[in-house]
Amino acid sequence: MKRLVLTLALFAGLIFTLVLITQVGVVSAGNDDESEIKQGFAIAPVPLNLKGKNRALVGLGSYIVNAQGVCADCHSCPTYAPGHNPYLGQPKQFNPDNYLAGGVPFGPFTSRNITPDPASGLPEEHTLDQFLLIMHTGIDLEKDHPQISPLLQVMPWPVYQSMTDRDLRAIYEYLSAIPHAEPGTCSGAGE
């Protein structure tokens, strides 16, 4: 009987230890997430409108868009503010005037303005469900865009389709928090 009690006590201790280790792992993952959110706010190149927005998702979205997704390279024209092009050895600063407003030519295609519509506040006038559909499938929902193909041809949606819905929602939340901007002038990709 004592042996059974001792075995049960050891088993309970093992279970407790495993639960504790799991909880520490969850806390660590939360801290990583929190650091990405904090970094996202630190690197946002434009003022953010957080009214009615999920603050954590906006910060995470900024982190994904500005530190991982390289969205400004294709959707800002020019990408960097004058005197702030890191490829010229200058301190990096995205161009806040035309940030994510599109207008970068890629052969017969031009990158789209993904800033919020001034009237609706939705990024590129798409709902969250439409945005998820675009990012998961590459379907081109642009009604006034000449249909060369039913799929986006330059946007790297095959990469983004593997992202979690939470990460894509964070991108969407961030894009709805940035100010509307108009495209700048570019002569070619990579400016």
Image (spheres, rainbow, N blue to C red):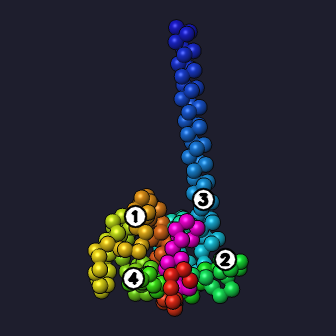
Quick one: which residue is furthest to the top in this view? 1
- Inter-mark Cα distance, 2 to 1: 28 Å
CB atoms at circles 3 and 1 under 8 Å apart?
Answer: no
Residue on which the image places disc 4: 109
Left or right: 152 as drawn, with respect to 33: left
Q: Please report the bounds of the magenta region as a residue range.
A: 65-78
Assess disc 2: are there few (<14), some (14-19) or many (≥20) residues with their C-alpha within 10 Å of its C-alpha. Answer: few
Q: Earlier in the sequence, mark 4 or mark 1?
A: 4
Q: Earlier in the sequence, mark 3 or mark 1?
A: 3
Taking the spot 42% from the left edge, 78% from the top edge, the residue there is 123
Q: Which mark is residue 34?
A: 3
What's the residue type where badge 1 is placed?
Answer: Pro
Where residue 58 appears, as percent x and y from the top left, is: 52, 69
- Inter-mark Cα distance, 3 to 4: 37 Å
Q: Nearer the viewer, mark 3 or mark 4?
A: 4
Q: Which mark is residue 158?
A: 1
Q: Is residue 157 above or below residue 189?
A: above
CB atoms at circles 2 and 1 under 8 Å apart?
Answer: no
- Inter-mark Cα distance, 4 to 2: 26 Å
Secondary structure category for the residue under label 3: helix
Q: Is residue 23 above or below residue 144?
A: above
Taking the spot 44% from the left edge, 63% from the top edge, the residue there is 159
Residue on which the image places disc 2: 86
The front one of 117 and 16 is 117
What's the residue type where badge 2 is placed?
Answer: Pro
Task: Considering the whole magenta stretch, tell me its main secondary structure.
Answer: helix
Q: Earlier in the sequence, mark 3 or mark 4?
A: 3
Secondary structure category for the residue under label 1: helix
